[in-house]
């Protein structure tokens, strides 16, 4: 994959994402779609804390990717849904993305503020598209 942050657009890296990701697919490439992962633990328990939910959702994302033989390095695009989004939640989310991807190029990302998610108390959800061979 090629990660591009074109001149003329602001630098998104401090927020933990890239503007453009190009995936030149050649056989036997596979697309992996990960359903929205929330902040619930394996027992289905949700913390009331936004940062804890973000951390758990990212751990859940990595578990789902691993089950498909993929990792964060294979992720081309994520979409995140945040209940009652504000700048403080953006800072928490951005910090978590940067920490998860480390020095690797971060994926393209869309953040969608929402009034509610599927479960009572759910504050955050993230889905991903990954490309593997």
Image: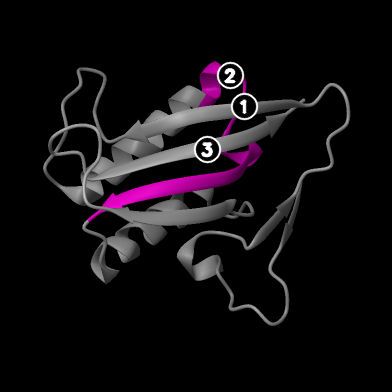
Q: What residue is rendered at 13% in x and 39% in y?
A: 121
- Cα distance in 3D space between marks 3 and 1: 8 Å
Q: What residue is rendered at 53% in x and 17% in y?
A: 67
Q: What residue is rendered at 28% in x and 70% in y?
A: 87
Q: Is residue 115 left or right of residue 109?
A: left
Residue 48 sits in which quadrant? top left
Q: Which mark is residue 32?
A: 1
Find disc 3 in the rendering and name its residue.
128
Q: Is residue 68 magenta?
A: yes
Task: Report the span colored magenta.
Answer: 65-83
Residue 96 or residue 31, whichever sits in front: 31
Label 1 vs 2, first from the N-terminus:
1
Q: Residues within 10 Å of mark 3 (few under 14, many from 20)?
A: many
Q: Answer whether labels 1 and 2 touch (C-beta < 8 Å).
A: yes
Viewer-nearest of labels 2 and 3?
A: 3
Label 3 vs 1, first from the N-terminus:
1
Q: Answer whether labels 3 and 1 touch (C-beta < 8 Å).
A: yes
Residue 88 sits in which quadrant? bottom left
Q: Residues within 10 Å of mark 1 (few under 14, many from 20)?
A: some
For the C terminus, the image quarter is top right
Determine the secondary structure under disc 2: loop
Q: Is residue 89 left or right of residue 8?
A: left
Residue 2 or residue 113, whichever sits in front: 113
Determine the secondary structure under disc 1: strand
Find disc 2 in the rendering and name its residue.
68
Q: What residue is rendered at 62% in x and 51% in y?
A: 104
Q: Which mark is residue 110?
A: none
- Cα distance in 3D space between marks 1 and 2: 7 Å
């Amino acid at each position: 994959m090629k990660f591009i942050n074109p001149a003329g657009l602001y630098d998104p890296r401090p927020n933990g994402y890239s503007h453009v990701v190009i995936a030149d697919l050649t056989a036997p490439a596979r697309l992996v779609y990960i359903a929205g992962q929330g902040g619930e633990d394996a027992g289905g328990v949700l913390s009331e804390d936004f940062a804890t939910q973000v951390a758990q959702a990212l751990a859940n994302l990595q578990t789902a990717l691993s089950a498909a033989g993929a990792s964060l390095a294979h992720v081309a695009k994520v979409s995140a849904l945040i209940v009652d989004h504000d700048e403080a939640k953006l800072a928490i989310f951005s910090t978590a993305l940067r920490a998860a991807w480390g020095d690797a190029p971060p994926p393209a990302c869309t953040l969608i503020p929402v009034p509610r998610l599927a479960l009572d108390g759910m504050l955050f959800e993230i889905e991903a598209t990954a490309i593997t061979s």
